[in-house]
Image: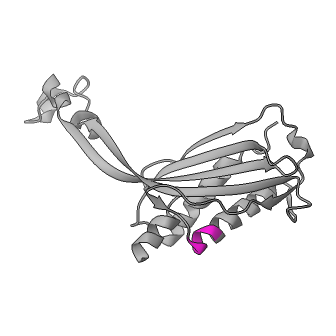
């Protein structure tokens, strides 16, 4: 259970050397200037190989989203009074990565003096060796729907490599970074 909780709270986090990839999309016909208040959508069912449905993760994501929306001037309201609804989903999925050995170890045979390399193979056969690894990829999806029509008008995804070895503080900072990046362009202009 502790291992699962660690993975769950890392769903938005990247391994220390990787980045968070964010994509945003929106309905270009929507007038976002009329949005002033929000409410949370009912919780969606968690998906993925390791579905995320932990109360601690839920609280953390909601806290960061609410802070960002408040900073942008939106106020929290009841579902009947809100202009838009916001919801999220989180999952962790196993992924494979394959690179040739030279690329994986950042070894450029075209730019390195063979005399400095010693016994390292420098011909093209080095590119025939493949380095394959398995890693966990966390995905967070934020959805915004018009509260009156219930139609999706904006959505964003954040994906990053996750690791159970990161500290809680590192995870919190990465969740903050992911949500900040996701909501940076919300509302679209």
Is 32 or 147 nearer to us in this picture? Answer: 147
Is 114 or 166 nearer to us in this picture? Answer: 166
Side of 157 where 170 appears, left or right: left
Whether residue 21 is in magenta: the answer is no
Is 26 or 19 nearer to us in this picture? Answer: 26
Q: Is residue 134 visible?
A: yes
The location of residue 143, given as percent across then percent down, is 70, 49
Q: Is residue 106 visible?
A: no
Residue visible at 42% across and 51% down in the picture:
17
Q: Quadrant of the N terminus?
A: bottom left
Side of 63 where 1 appears, left or right: left
In this view, 179 is above or below 28: below
Residue visible at 17% across and 29% down in the picture:
128
Q: Which residues are magenta?
A: 54-58
Side of 120 where 175 appears, left or right: right
- Residue 90 falls in which quadrant of the image? bottom right
Whether residue 56 is in magenta: the answer is yes
Residue visible at 23% across and 34% down in the picture:
102
Residue visible at 69% across and 65% down in the picture:
62
Color scheme of the displayed model: one colour
Is 34 or 42 nearer to us in this picture? Answer: 42
In this view, 108 is above or below 180: above
In this view, 112 is above or below 81: above
Q: Quadrant of the C terminus?
A: top right
In this view, 169 is above or below 98: below
The location of residue 30, given as percent across then percent down, is 84, 36
**Residue lying at the far left of the rendered structure:** 119
The location of residue 127, given as percent across then percent down, is 20, 29
């Amino acid at each position: 259970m502790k291992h699962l909780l660690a993975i769950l709270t890392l769903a938005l986090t990247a391994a220390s050397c990787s980045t968070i990839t964010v994509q945003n999309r929106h309905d270009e016909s929507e007038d976002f200037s009329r949005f002033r208040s929000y409410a949370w959508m009912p919780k969606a069912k968690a998906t993925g190989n390791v579905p995320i449905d932990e109360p601690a993760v839920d609280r953390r994501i909601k806290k960061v989203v609410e802070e960002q929306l408040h900073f942008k001037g939106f106020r929290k309201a009841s579902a009947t009074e809100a202009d838009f609804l916001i919801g999220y989903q989180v999952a962790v999925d196993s992924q494979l990565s394959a690179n040739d050995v030279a690329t994986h170890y950042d070894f450029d045979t075209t730019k390195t003096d063979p005399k400095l390399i010693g016994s390292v193979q420098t011909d093209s056969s080095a590119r025939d060796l493949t380095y394959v690894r398995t890693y966990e990829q966390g995905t967070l999806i934020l959805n915004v729907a018009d509260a009156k029509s219930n139609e999706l008008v904006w959505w964003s995804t954040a994906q990053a490599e996750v690791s159970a070895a990161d500290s809680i503080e590192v995870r919190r900072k990465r969740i903050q970074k992911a949500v900040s990046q996701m909501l940076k362009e919300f509302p679209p202009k």
